[in-house]
Amino acid sequence: MAGNGRFTTLLLFEAFEKALMQFMHEDEQVLSWPRAKASVAHSLASQLQRSLRSVLGLSEDNASPGFFSLPGDVKVDILIKGCDILVHDRKGKHLLGIVLGYDYLSRPQQEHLHQLKEQGFKLVLGVSFLMQKEYVLLYSPKQESLEYYHFNKQDGTTHHLMQRDVESETDDGQLSLGIKERKKRKNPAPTQDQ
């Protein structure tokens, strides 16, 4: 049996990239279903289990080709312990935690990523599918910052976008939608009926 030492951060991220690429090519339609977070998590988790076997160099389970077991009691679960997808062993070691979203992750969701990292996860990722974009926005918490990456939906490449300090009071490094705040009018505009 292989120990959890084989599950490095780099290996986990490589497996995640492969799984996300397969998901985008085979299961992207699930993203258009209403209230389908569990279905998205299940589809991506299935792809992740396959890609983990692949990056570990494990062959397909011949006894049950549809079942992709992992070494060392490592399991892939969905919707558990504050994660939409969790890769862990049965002894309580959390390897990879993934939080999914259809839009940009909110500040509380981003803070939740940091909380998961502080709980001892080897790797924590936030995923914003952003259907209107040609990329998936990935978030990765570090000690005092949050890293942003673009995952290209077409070719499966990932590029570092930026890093933002989480302790700063200003949001100068925060991704924004460019929406300006409007000043409220003191008197409402008259309507045709008045």
Image (cartoon, helix red, strand yellow):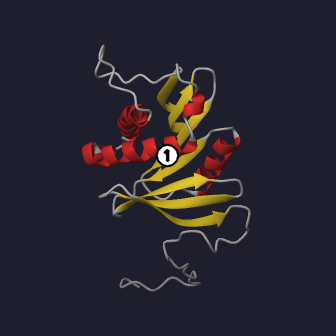
| Vertical comparison of 2 with 157: above or below | above
| Vertical comparison of 72 with 143: above or below | above
Q: Is residue 157 visible in this depiction of the protein?
A: yes
Extreme residue toward the front, this view = 57
As rendered, which of 55 and 128 lies closer to the eye? 55
Residue 4 found in image quarter? top right
| Vertical comparison of 42 with 192: above or below | above
Q: Is residue 31 visible in this depiction of the protein?
A: no
As rendered, which of 94 and 171 lies closer to the eye? 94
Residue 193 found in image quarter? bottom left
Residue at image position (45%, 45%) is: 14
- Report the residue marked by disc 1: 13
As rendered, which of 81 and 161 lies closer to the eye? 161
- Coordinates of residue 191 in the picture (x, y in percent): 40, 83
Residue at image position (58%, 51%) is: 109
21 lies left or right of 187: left
Which quarter of the figure is the C terminus placed in? bottom left
- Coordinates of residue 151 in the picture (x, y in percent): 41, 58
Residue at image position (38%, 42%) is: 19
- Coordinates of residue 121 in the picture (x, y in percent): 63, 38
| Vertical comparison of 153 with 25: above or below | below
- Coordinates of residue 59 in the picture (x, y in percent): 35, 26
77 lies left or right of 165: left
Label 1 environment density (alpha carbons within 10 Å; few <14, some 14–19, many ≥20):
some
